[in-house]
């Protein structure tokens, strides 16, 4: 990545002149001007007409982006500063002056004011104390009349302005204002004084005072001209940010302030011009202030990616010094602004893996939830969570931490034995005190990952007791998830059937207004009813009527394409196309995607898209060929997830043989037809008899 310094941009005759002056910020990448509009930033009470905006193209490695920037217009090139860069001493002097001005803003507060400058002039200090003795804005006006113009420094002007606004916002003054009505003479005086004070402040050298003045003016409750002065201050701040006069924290504060003002459209444009102040201060971004930069990402639009790339670079340097709360907040911000970066996620994962032993429970809870929300998983995070559960599962005070870890495993189908066994022990010890939400979060992954508890007697006893006591507290969706988890694991909750197929519970289910949620719960009810009917002899079902309405079922496109490809080899192996049927739906099962048989092998003439057969008479005549895509397995293993294991079980209960084919294996064998035939024959021969 090339690096260049673009210093002070001047506008003349419809062109932008770029001069390499050290008082302007450093911009990474190759800078090119691609367009320039007319002046859009007019300043009130003495408008500045020397400002305009342009668009620059920034290249950061392979990233190229258009960004807004502010420029200054000049009519006479002779009025430009001395551009003789041979005199490096003069350039260095200018940098030193700018740096001193910016650094002085880190001093101590004066009085109770916002500004962080210390005035050493005894006369100025006496004047400021005089303002503090005033109890009405009129008193400040009178005091200002007695002060010579040369003694009204920017700091004095700020203190006067701040005192006037404080007095005007005072509750007693507001009551008096309402009673007395508007005083046009006083308003005229106020306008004149405010204009003079603002002009004094914006023409001063101390940039920090201008920022603090904007804070004070933004809190003004009276006076229609507050926006009038605020625009002037904002434009001056924009220029000084471009000149590199503000620190990283101050630039972030300016972003938040401009984003909070009323004129949303204009301020959004202004906010996006502040990126240059952060790029200039990249070396000053440390672990102490990097979070301030992260927090402004939601306020940026056009320049968000540029600032985020900057944060990526700095995060790789300072990550090991950040606290857990910062990592959790970064994940939350990335989710809010919909930014995903593999480089940033690797940094956050490395921090988690390194600091898992020292992170607090609250921070770990938010970190795990953040990774889930961003749909990010890697082996480093998994190893860290395994170490944490092994070492601290019995000592965890907040059950939500382990429930979040279990939810993480369930979301990414991580069949981690250390985590599952640790959470099993915790559930047995503390399950009595869990809320329904925690119970569902802790228990559901056992079924999803097809992991039967090792200490099953104690585990199921605790679960049954808690469900019996707190069933009415469960949300319908969570209650159905718990019931289905039991079924996935081959346990049949007969004691709770009457609570599920109960008018009160069904009314709660149908109270949901969201049709998607309602449709999902109906599907879960059908699955539970079907599973209990097929597998539990003591179940007096089915409880639900058959759904004979015509439906279109979604089928994974990968499976559909693979069916089309292997149909020909299977027809050759089985003896003809009339002995196989694709995408079969059985009358005995609900019309759900889970129960679609990818390919059905059968005797000639006994096929069709909907097959009728008698379980007793036609046992083992039909063969269900199932194609399993990677999502049907637990991550990194050949262990099927709970719903797929139940699906296979149900087909066998109906008297069919089941052949399981791996999609990845089939995809690799497409270019080896002979090996593919051998694989299919092997799988057909190894099909187990139906139970």
Image: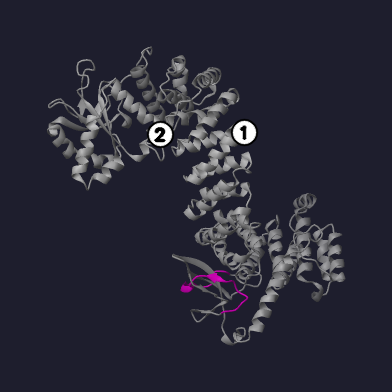
**Badge 1: residue crowd in 10 Å (few <14, some 14–19, many ≥20):** few
Tell me which residue sits at (51%, 48%) in the image. Answer: 335
**Is residue 557 in sight in this rendering?**
no
- Distance from the alpha carbon under mark 1 to that under mark 2: 32 Å
For the C terminus, which image quadrant? top left
Left or right? Give the position of 262 relative to 63: right
Badge 2: how crowded within 10 Å, few (<14), some, or many (20+)?
Answer: few
Q: Position of residue 343 (x, y in %)?
A: 49, 55
Where residue 231 sits: x, y (%)? Answer: 63, 65
Q: Secondary structure at mark 2?
A: helix
Image quadrant where residue 578 sits: top left
Indicate whether residue 350 is drawn in magenta: no
User: Bounds of the magenta span?
Assistant: 20-41
Describe residue 603's horizontal placement relative to residue 287 as left or right. left
Q: Quadrant of residue 209?
A: bottom right
Q: Which residue is mark 2?
A: 516
Residue underneath mark 1: 398
Q: Is residue 22 magenta?
A: yes
One can see residue 562 in this view: yes
Residue 640 in the image: state x and y as whole percent. Answer: 37, 33
């Amino acid at each position: 990545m090339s690096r260049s310094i673009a210093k002070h941009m001047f506008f003349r005759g419809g062109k932008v002149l770029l001069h390499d002056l050290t008082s302007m910020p450093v911009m990474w990448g190759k800078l090119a001007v691609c367009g320039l509009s007319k002046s859009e930033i007019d300043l009130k009470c003495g408008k500045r007409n020397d400002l305009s905006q342009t668009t620059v193209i920034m290249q950061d490695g392979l990233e190229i982006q258009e960004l807004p920037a502010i420029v200054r217009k000049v009519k006479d090139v002779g009025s430009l500063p001395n551009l003789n860069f041979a005199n490096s001493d003069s350039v260095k002097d200018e940098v030193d002056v700018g740096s001193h001005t910016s650094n002085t803003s880190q001093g101590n507060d004066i009085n109770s004011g916002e500004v962080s400058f210390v005035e050493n002039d005894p006369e100025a200090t006496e004047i400021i104390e005089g303002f503090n003795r005033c109890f009405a804005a009129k008193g400040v006006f009178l005091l200002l009349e007695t002060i010579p113009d040369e003694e009204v420094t920017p700091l004095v002007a700020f203190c006067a302005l701040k005192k006037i606004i404080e007095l005007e916002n005072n509750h007693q003054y507001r009551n008096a204002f309402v009673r007395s009505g508007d005083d046009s003479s006083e308003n005229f005086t106020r306008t004149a004084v405010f204009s003079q004070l603002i002009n004094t402040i914006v023409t001063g050298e101390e940039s920090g005072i201008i920022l603090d003045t904007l804070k004070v003016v933004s809190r003004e409750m009276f006076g229609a001209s507050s926006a009038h002065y605020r625009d002037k201050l904002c434009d001056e701040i924009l220029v000084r940010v471009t000149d590199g006069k503000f620190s990283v924290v101050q630039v972030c504060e300016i972003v938040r302030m401009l984003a909070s003002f009323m004129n949303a459209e204009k301020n959004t444009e202004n906010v996006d011009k502040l990126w240059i102040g952060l790029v200039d201060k990249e070396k000053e971004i440390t672990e102490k202030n990097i979070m301030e930069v992260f927090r402004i990402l939601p306020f940026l639009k056009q320049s968000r990616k540029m600032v985020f790339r900057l944060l990526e670079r700095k995060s790789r340097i300072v990550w090991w010094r950040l606290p857990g709360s910062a990592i959790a907040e970064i994940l939350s911000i990335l989710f809010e602004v919909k930014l995903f970066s593999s480089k940033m996620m690797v940094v956050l994962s490395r921090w988690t893996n390194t600091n898992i032993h020292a992170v607090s429970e609250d921070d770990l809870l938010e970190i795990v939830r953040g990774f889930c929300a961003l749909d990010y998983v890697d082996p480093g995070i998994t190893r860290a969570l395994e170490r944490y559960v092994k070492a601290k599962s019995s000592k965890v005070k907040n059950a939500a931490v382990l429930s979040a870890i279990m939810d993480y495993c369930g979301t990414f189908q991580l069949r981690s034995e250390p985590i599952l066994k640790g959470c099993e022990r915790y559930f047995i010890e503390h399950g009595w005190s869990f809320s329904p939400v925690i119970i569902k979060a802790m228990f559901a992954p056992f079924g999803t990952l097809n992991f039967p508890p090792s200490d099953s007697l104690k585990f199921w006893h605790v679960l049954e007791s808690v469900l019996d006591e707190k069933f009415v507290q469960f949300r319908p969706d969570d209650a159905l998830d718990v019931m289905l988890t039991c079924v996935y694991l081959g346990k049949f909750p007969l004691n709770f059937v009457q609570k599920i197929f109960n008018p009160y519970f069904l009314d709660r289910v149908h109270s949901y207004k969201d049709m998607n949620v309602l449709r999902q719960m109906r599907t879960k009810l059908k699955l539970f009813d079907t599973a209990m009917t097929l597998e539990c002899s003591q179940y007096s079902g089915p409880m639900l009527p058959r759904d004979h309405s015509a439906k279109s079922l979604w089928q994974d496109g990968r499976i559909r394409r693979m069916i089309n490809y292997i149909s020909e080899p299977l027809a050759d192996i089985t003896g003809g196309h009339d002995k196989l049927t694709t995408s079969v739906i059985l009358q005995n099962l609900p019309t759900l995607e889970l129960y679609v048989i990818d390919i059905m092998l059968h005797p000639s003439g006994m096929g069709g898209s909907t097959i009728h057969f008698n379980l007793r008479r036609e046992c083992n005549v039909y063969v269900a060929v199932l194609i399993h895509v990677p999502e049907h397995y637990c991550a990194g293993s050949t262990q099927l997830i709970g719903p797929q294991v139940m699906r296979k079980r149900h087909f066998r209960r109906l008297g069919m043989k089941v052949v399981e084919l791996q999609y990845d294996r089939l995809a690799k064998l497409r270019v080896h037809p002979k090996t593919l035939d051998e694989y299919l024959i092997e799988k057909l021969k190894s099909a187990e008899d139906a139970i």
